[in-house]
Image (cartoon, coloured by chain):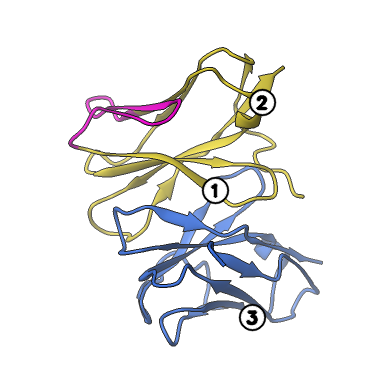
Chain colours: A blue, B yellow
Amino acid sequence: GAGVSQSPRYKVAKRGQDVALRCDPISGHVSLFWYQQALGQGPEFLTYFQNEAQLDKSGLPSDRFFAERPEGSVSTLKIQRTQQEDSAVYLCASSLRGLNTEAFFGQGTRLTVV
Amino acid sequence: GESVGLHLPTLSVQEGDNSIINCAYSNSASDYFIWYKQESGKGPQFIIDIRSNMDKRQGQRVTVLLNKTVKHLSLQIAATQPGDSAVYFCAENPPAGRRALTFGSGTRLQVQP
């Protein structure tokens, strides 16, 4: 496809369950970002990849959050032992070169922890 | 779909009027700024960007103004249309430290037909 694709679109998880969220960036885009967006708030940075290298994970809220991009294209954000406070929209974005270039966002995955 | 910006400041304008959305950014060393539009249930959509060596940039129906002295950014939308109704975020890219855009809290634009 032409844009950033995220799946699933919606995910309901029971508290304590592990979840995996997938991001397919635009083909050829070097940089990939994950953001968390709570209701009524702006997106908050989680982590950043340049190709397969995770260069910044300072935004990950706890060690229950883990992200990978093993082949420099598709990325997965994994949340272990989900808690209610993890409920949010998780957005993925990619850009052609990196910082200071336009980043394109996917539609997000809406995670609800019950 | 889910709602974005339930508790955000809201700007209501009449169709055809010009809209001005303001944003105060936090880091005086930030060198790149972007305005995003986010409709309910969708991801942010790029509108226009500006680098810190400029104070104005124009696009199609949109203009971004940058005042580095007071760390202020504004988005002007000419002849606002109902399709412009959305939440608008400014984002800044600090030159060092965190390697990603930092988003502001957003403004909801409501266009009355």
**Distance in Å between CA atoms under marks 1 and 3:** 26 Å
Asked if residue B56 lies in the magenta stretch, the reply is yes
Q: Nearer the viewer, residue B96 or B78?
A: B78
**Residue A35 position within the rendered picture, expressed as x and y whole percent measured from the top left:** 52, 60
Residue at the bottom extreme of this rendering: A70
Residue for badge 1: B44
**Distance in Å between CA atoms under marks 3 and 2:** 42 Å
Chain where mark 1 sits = B
User: Type of residue at label 3?
Assistant: Gln
User: Type of residue at label 2?
Assistant: Pro
Q: Image quadrant for the C terminus of chain B?
A: top right
**Distance in Å between CA atoms under marks 2 and 1:** 18 Å
Q: Nearer the viewer, residue A26 or A69?
A: A26
**Residue A41 position within the rendered picture, expressed as x and y whole percent measured from the top left:** 59, 44
Residue B77 image label: none
Residue for badge 3: A80
- Residue A13 visible in the current orientation: yes
User: Type of residue at label 1?
Assistant: Pro
Q: Residue at x 51, y 15 (%)?
A: B18
**Residue A26 position within the rendered picture, expressed as x and y whole percent measured from the top left:** 47, 67
Q: Residue at x 59, y 14 (%)?
A: B16
Residue B82 image label: 2
Residue at the left extreme of this rendering: B53
Span colored in magenta: B53-72
Circle 3: element type: loop
